[in-house]
Amino acid sequence: MSAEKSVPYRPIQVLMMPDYRVDNPYQTLLAQSLESNGVQVHFPWGYRRVFPIFRAVNTSPQPFNVLHLHWLSPYTKGDRWLVKFVYSVKFLIDVIITRWIGVRVVWTVHNRISHDSKFPGLDLWTRRILAQLVDRIILHNHSTLDAIAQEYRFDITKAAVIPIGHYRNVYRPLIDEKLARDQLGLPLTGRIYLHQGMLRPYKGIEQLLKVWAENADILQGDTLLIIGKALNAAYGKQLTQLATGIKGVIIYPEFIEDDRMHIFFSAATIVVLPFKSILTSSSLVVAMSYSKPIIAPKLGEIQETLGVANSLLYEPNDEQGLLQAFKKSIYVNLEQLSQLVTQACDLLDWNKIGLEISKLYQATLSF
């Protein structure tokens, strides 16, 4: 009687698209966590105009089991409605033919619709169809699961909630606060409120400047530091002009290199993220990775991710909410709050996240 032949183990092969690793460490960290759990992760090579997803899969010498989609904007671009509609239809066909050749599709929803979308109705239409086409959907928090499932019109059992991991190992560690302030030419006294991340209209920067300008007496001696690459030159100029003449405001509408990020957070006392709306936020997780107390609205992901480190969160519909958070930050125990932020960040462990997503891939392939 012959012994049964053992079947060699074949790791899951995943293609991640689009490749945004240059601008955001998220995908690099995700890929590393998946590979530590036995998944082999690949990114597309080169630029393909027609059906870029199918062509990336079909021309690769490496067969893929799973396509993991992230941001959709590179595939559904267009400044005019008709152009964007054509690209959106081509993208959906691209996903369909990729599935026809046997590749499973997982989609991580990072935002409700594309930020600053000119055609939100068209974006939502595309996402509703995509939600029906893909095998599984990943969201980063439970608090928005029901709303997104209802808006995109998919069965909630199709989705899994898996958070974004921390950025503790991406940037350099903190240095002495006064040394950092001195290096940046910032005041050595008073609190420094830091707003960090790409400068875009949905982040509420205009309202932040307005509240700061109207309450100079309360924030006297403190500094508001706004850093990050602006959406475009025009918006950067607009913010710079708004900030001109407001006492205590310093704005750097420029990209901050990874090896300098720690200096700004070392100088900062509190991070301010006054979003108008948000589904997920890397800026929040970066601030948590540095254990900084955070002022922000009580929006889904923010409140859920911070947990009990929520002392400086405010109601988003309260016109005085941001001001009240500033006032509270003057007397709250910042050291204790920082410790709570650290504990909340401990839960954003990449090894656990990689394990959960690898299990999701396995379940998808077994279905």
Image (cartoon, rainbow, N blue to C red):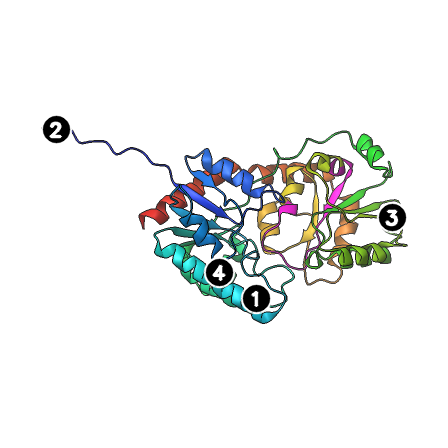
Residue 89 percent across, percent down from the top left: 48, 65
Residue type indicated by callout 3? Gly
Mark 3 and mark 2 in contact (Cβ < 8 Å)? no
Q: Earlier in the sequence, mark 1 or mark 2?
A: 2
Q: Earlier in the sequence, mark 1 or mark 4?
A: 1
Which residue corresponds to mark 3? 248
Residue 148 within the magenta-colored segment of the rendering? no
Q: Residues within 10 Å of mark 3 (few under 14, many from 20)?
A: some
Using the image, determine if residue 299 lies above or below residue 189: below
Q: Residues within 10 Å of mark 1 (few under 14, many from 20)?
A: some
Q: Quadrant of the N terminus?
A: top left
Distance (Cα) linking label 1 and label 4: 10 Å
Which residue corresponds to mark 2? 2
Q: Earlier in the sequence, mark 4 or mark 3?
A: 4
Residue stretch in magenta: 264-284
Mark 2 and mark 1 in contact (Cβ < 8 Å)? no
Which residue corresponds to mark 4? 91
Distance (Cα) linking label 4 and label 3: 47 Å
Residue type indicated by callout 4? Phe
The answer to which quarter of the image holds residue 174 is top right
